[in-house]
Image: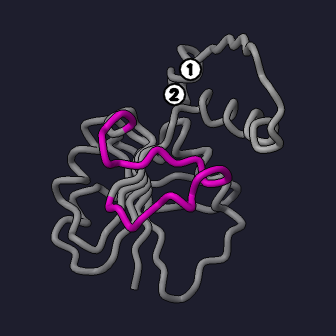
Amino acid sequence: MVNIVITGVTGLIGFELLKLLKNHKFGNNINVYLTSSSNIKTLEFQGVFYDIRRLKEFYGNDEKQIFINCATNDIAREIKNMMNKQSILIDNSTEYRMTENIPLIIPEINFNTYQNQSIIASPNCCCTILGLVIYSFIKEKNDISFIDVTTFQSASGAGIQG
C-alpha cells in the first residue's frame, strides 16, 4: 500500500495540484490523502467533498508514503523529520531548492537524473515554465544569446485568497 499525502491543499498550489489529479486513475494499492494546516475540515471540488486531514496523522506510518508538499518550508522540514526510510518528499517550497545532493527536478526535462533520493525539490513556477519553453531550443542545439524575463510571483504567492 502507498499513501500519497498532499499538504497545503487549501492553498493555491495545492488546489491546482488537486485539479491536475482529479481525473487520474490510481490503482487499488494507492490511497490519496489531503492535508492542510487551515481550519477547513472538508473541501468541495467539482461537486465532490474531500476530508482534510492533519499531517500528524501520518507520523509513524510504516507504509510507503509519497508526500507532495504544496505548503511552507516549515512543513517541508516537518515531513523530512517524520517520514520513514521508504517514503519520498516532493517539495514545492523553497526549503530544498538549493540543497546539495537534493535533485532539482522538472520531470519533462531531467526526471532521468532522479536516483531514489528521499527528497526531490521542485524549481519555482517561473523556472519550471521557462525551462520547459527553452529546453527544446537547447536540446536542438539552437543558440540563445539573451532571455529577458518578467515575473509576477508576488501576486501568485499570495495564495488562493489573493
Q: Main secondary structure of the magenta part?
A: loop
Seen in the picture, residue 25 relative to 10 is either above or below; the reply is below
Write down the quadrant of residue 65 in the picture.
bottom left
Give the colouring mode of the picture. Answer: one colour
Instruction: Identify the disc placed on residue 159.
Output: 2
Looking at the image, residue 151 sits to the left or right of residue 83; the answer is right
Q: Which residue does the image show at 28% across and 56% down from the upper left?
A: 55
Amino acid type of disc 1?
A: Gly
Amino acid type of disc 2?
A: Gly
Which residues make up the magenta segment? 97-118
Residue 70 percent location from the top left of the image? 45, 44
Which residue is tagged 1?
162
Mark 1 burial class by Cα count in 10 Å: few <14, some 14-19, many 20+: few
Secondary structure at badge 1 equals loop
- Of 60 and 47, nearer the camera is 60
Looking at the image, residue 144 sits to the left or right of residue 27; the answer is right
- Asked if the residues shown at circle 2 and circle 1 are in contact, with their CB atoms under 8 angstroms apart, the answer is yes
Write down the quadrant of residue 25 in the picture.
bottom right
Residue 149 percent location from the top left of the image? 69, 13
- Of 148 and 53, nearer the camera is 148
Residue 76 percent location from the top left of the image? 30, 44
Q: Can residue 106 be found in the magenta stretch?
A: yes
Of the 4 image quadrants, the one containing the N terminus is bottom left
Q: Which residue does the image show at 17% across and 59% down from the upper left?
A: 82
- Of 8 and 88, nearer the camera is 88
Residue 95 percent location from the top left of the image? 32, 35
